[in-house]
Image (tube, rainbow, N blue to C red):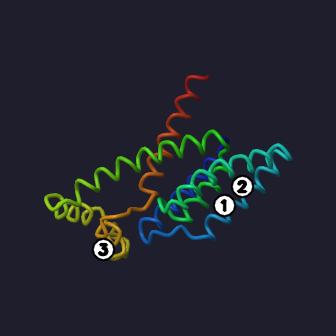
Amino acid sequence: MDIIQTAALAVLLIIAFVTDVKSQIIPNRLTVSFFAAAWLYQFTVHGKTGLIAAASGAAAGFVPLLLLHLAKGIGAGDVKLFAAIGAWAGVWIVLQMLFYAILYAGLIGIVLLLVNRSFGRKIWLEVTALTVPSSGWRKHQWLQWTESGNKFPFMLAVAPAAITVWSMLQEVNLWGR
């Protein structure tokens, strides 16, 4: 991945994180615009090979998450997000992100199960209240999903997965020199 692809993915993931944590929605205009931009970029820089890479990466991100969506495990925005990520990053990177996101989601799920028990619920709400940004968003907007106890924004797992994969790529690049 080059610097433009990395920057585009960083912007996409930051915006998706904020919107998903705030409202549990990843807007279509975000995913569709980044998806289209990826195809345009891949074609402009790599020609027909870039289009094939974008299509393969998009399919690799879309299909597995579509199955999770059909099983009511994640929202449709997450499916479209991973199609856009795949179009930018390619098959192997999007599959690695999926793998780590699912692992992190499992860990978060276990933590939420423990925390939402009566002994941990009050502590959890107090800790999350401390992490609410002071940028004008109300506590209710940020903590609405925490109080339900049955679901959480998938971006809470995708963000550390992206950082994990990016860190691994940087380590490979350092050793490859």
Does the residue at mark 1 contact the one at mark 2 (Cβ under 8 Å)? yes
Q: Earlier in the sequence, mark 3 or mark 1?
A: 1
Mark 1: which amino acid? Phe
Q: Which mark is residue 34?
A: 1
Looking at the image, tell me whether mark 3 or mark 2 is earlier in sequence order: 2
Question: Which image quarter holds the C terminus?
Answer: top right
Locate residue 129 relative to residue 152 in the image: left or right. Answer: left
Residue placed under numbered mark 2 in the picture: 38
Cα gap from disc 3 to disc 2, whole angstroms = 35 Å
- Above or below, 15 against 140 in this view is above
Q: Which image quadrant: the N terminus?
A: top right
Q: Residue at x 61, y 67 (%)?
A: 30
Element at label 3: helix
**Quadrant housing residue 116:** bottom left
Could you say whether the residue bearing mark 2 is in a helix, strand or loop?
helix
- Identity of the residue drawn at 71% across and 55% down: 38
Q: Which mark is residue 139?
A: 3
Q: Are marks 3 and 1 in contact (CB under 8 Å)?
A: no
Q: What residue sits 13% from the left and 58% below the top?
A: 119
Measured from the top left, where is residue 115 in percent x and y?
22, 56
